[in-house]
Image: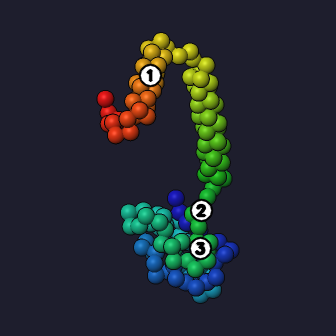
């Protein structure tokens, strides 16, 4: 992928000295990037240096072909579809879990636990100095 100088360039020429591959050239009034030399600063920096030093942040941008623009649009569309599918699946699972009947095991456990707590509360109410742990 290569970068390109956009119409937002103000001609400050900061990018000239920052380009590690020397892909940026000027004729004194206009800047351009040689696509054969520009490698998007791969192997040198994590972001293109022409973009990072640009005072407008828009004077130098990655060059996007129509095919890349279509791929970006599809990725964004698929992302929305992904989340719609995810939440749909989530809602189905939650509905099934809520509709599921309680098992006898958990009902027995809950009743036993409640009975133990009621017993502790009654014991503590009669003797405030009694320990809460049986």
Cα distance in 3D space between marks 1 and 2 = 71 Å
Furthest toward the right, the residue is: 7
Q: Is residue 89 above or below residue 112?
A: below
Q: Is residue 54 visible?
A: yes
**Which of labels 1 and 3 is toward the front?**
1
Q: Which residue is mark 2?
A: 63
Residue 57 is tagged as 3
Quadrant of the drawing holding the C terminus: top left
Instruction: Read off the residue under disc 1.
Output: 115
Residue 64: which quarter of the image? bottom right
The answer to whether the residues at label 1 and label 3 have Cβ atoms under 8 Å apart is: no
- Circle 1 SS class: helix
- Work out whether 72 lies above or below 51: above
Q: Earlier in the sequence, mark 1 or mark 2?
A: 2
Query: Is 94 on the left-hand or right-hand side of 47?
Result: right
Query: x and y percent of residue 116 in the render?
Result: 40, 24
Q: Secondary structure at mark 3?
A: loop
Q: Position of residue 37 (x, y in %)?
A: 47, 67
Position of 64 relative to 74 (above/below): below
Q: Residue at x 64, y 82 (%)?
A: 10
Look at the numbered disc 2 and give the secondary structure of its residue.
loop
- Of residues 73 and 31, the one drawn nearer to the viewer in this rendering: 73
């Amino acid at each position: 992928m290569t970068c390109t100088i956009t119409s937002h360039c103000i001609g400050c020429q900061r990018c000239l000295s920052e380009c590690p591959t020397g892909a940026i050239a000027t004729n004194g009034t206009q800047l351009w990037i040689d696509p054969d030399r520009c490698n998007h600063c791969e192997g040198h920096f994590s972001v293109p240096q022409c973009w990072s030093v640009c005072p407008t942040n828009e004077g130098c941008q990655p060059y996007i072909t129509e095919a890349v623009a279509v791929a970006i649009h599809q990725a964004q569309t698929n992302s929305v579809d992904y989340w719609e599918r995810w939440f749909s699946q989530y809602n189905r699972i939650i509905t099934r879990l809520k509709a599921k009947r309680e098992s006898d095991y958990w009902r027995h456990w809950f009743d036993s636990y409640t009975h133990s707590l009621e017993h502790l509360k009654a014991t503590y109410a009669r003797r405030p100095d009694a320990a809460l742990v049986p």
